[in-house]
Image (spheres, rainbow, N blue to C red):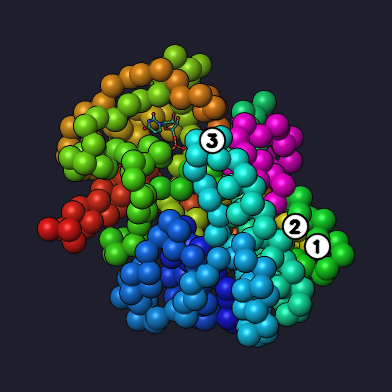
Amino acid sequence: MKILVTGGTGYIGSHTVVELQQSGHEVVIVDNLSNSYASVVDQIEKITGIRPAFESFDLADPKKTLDFFDRHRDLGGVIHFAAYKAVGESMTEPLKYYHNNLSSLINILKGMQKAGVTNLVFSSSCTVYGQPDVLPVTESAPIKEAWSPYGHTKQISEKIIENTSRVNEINGILLRYFNPIGAHESALIGELPIGIPNNLVPFITQTAIGLRDKLRVFGDDYDTPDGTAIRDYIHVVDLAKAHVVAIDRMLKGKNKKQVEIFNLGTGKGFSVLDVIHSFEKVSAQKLNYEIVARRPGDVEKVWADTRFANEVLGWNAGKSLDDMMLSAWNWELALKKAKA
Ligand code: UFG
């Protein structure tokens, strides 16, 4: 089937395009390249031998989005990644986040309705849970007050899809990602943060390669075994594969409800120091880091109950933390080689 992947030149999007093509789907990417590069399309072609169709425009533009759906009435579904995602930036530029993340989703839903496209996979986040009261966190855990406009856009987007599905015959699968890291084993695609990375793993690999002075570990006074914060890190390729399962589930009419929600994590929590130690082991590099104060807005610990995704989707995140860190390091090395 032909699948629209919005944000398909981005980090998770590009890995998902590869997995979709390798499972026989035809892909059309829409991306405005605000946080990615057109050359990612070449890299996808190198991995899969197939060049995905690619259109560059802004999905927040209603006219262009409706026009796209007019021209693509044969779509089997949409996987919607395109969104702004920097938590800190969303605090200083909230309207940029509300406008982009919500209007693009609304335009896509209108386009789907017009073109009779019924299946939507949406990128949500474990951020909707805030600091959960019970760990591991299940999909039925309460949605807490969002800590950032970014997180709030994910909560509102989930509601928009739920409300729309009731009246517009849209099937939705909302995937709540935990912390995606790592890169494709080919080292041809990976995370390409523009400017100084906010996230832990690109900061680690950029420090080790000499682009950054040292990593700052935000807080060692949390109520965790080593005092540093705990997250559920998941390999981006495992995450990408779940999108193929999700879209196939709806294409085959196997979804049990119009909107289904799944946590995508490994179910295991690792501390910041665990991640650093895994990196040092697989890369044989000593990482320069210091402990500093907590980062405002960070939760202490969160990891997923993945049983629902495992049982219902028949999907499992198989890759270990060491696999994730090695692939992230190989990607950083490949970037350096490409620049040389
Ligand atoms: N960390 C550091 N130093 C850094 C960067 C991060 O110590 O330079 C720590 C953070 O304090 C946190 C952990 O590493 O404990 C992971 O931080 P990330 O920034 O990589 O990821 P977050 O868990 O903060 O954020 C991720 C996604 C968000 C999503 C959020 C939901 O990036 O999009 O999970 O919890 F909203």
> Residue 283 or 338: which is nearer the viewer?
338
Q: Which residue is mark 3?
A: 92
Q: Which residue is mark 2?
A: 161
Mark 1 beta carbon near ligand 1 (under 8 Å)? no
Q: Quick one: quadrant of the C terminus?
A: bottom left
Q: Which residue is mark 1?
A: 165
Going 47% across and 29% down the picture, which residue do you hit? Answer: 230
Residue type, label 3: Thr
Query: Does residue 304 lie above or below 10 as drawn?
Result: above
Magenta stretch: give its range.
Answer: 134-157
Q: Earlier in the sequence, mark 3 or mark 2?
A: 3
Mark in front: 1 vs 3? 3
User: Regarding mark 2 in the picture, which secondary structure is present there?
Assistant: helix
User: Regarding mark 1 in the picture, which secondary structure is present there?
Assistant: helix
Q: Given contact means CB atoms under 8 Å apart, are the residues at marks 1 and 2 in contact?
A: yes
Let me know if residue 144 is in the magenta part: yes
> Residue 34 or 83: which is nearer the viewer?
34
What is the C-alpha distance between the residues marked 1 and 3?
Answer: 32 Å
Query: Does residue 121 lie above or below 281 as drawn?
Result: below
Q: Given contact means CB atoms under 8 Å apart, are the residues at marks 3 and 2 in contact?
A: no
Q: Is residue 181 visible?
A: yes
Residue type, label 1: Ser
Q: Main secondary structure of the magenta part?
A: loop
What is the C-alpha distance between the residues marked 1 and 2?
Answer: 6 Å
Mark 2 beta carbon near ligand 1 (under 8 Å)? no
Q: Residues within 10 Å of mark 3 (few under 14, many from 20)?
A: few
Question: Where residue 305 sits: x, y (%)?
Answer: 61, 40
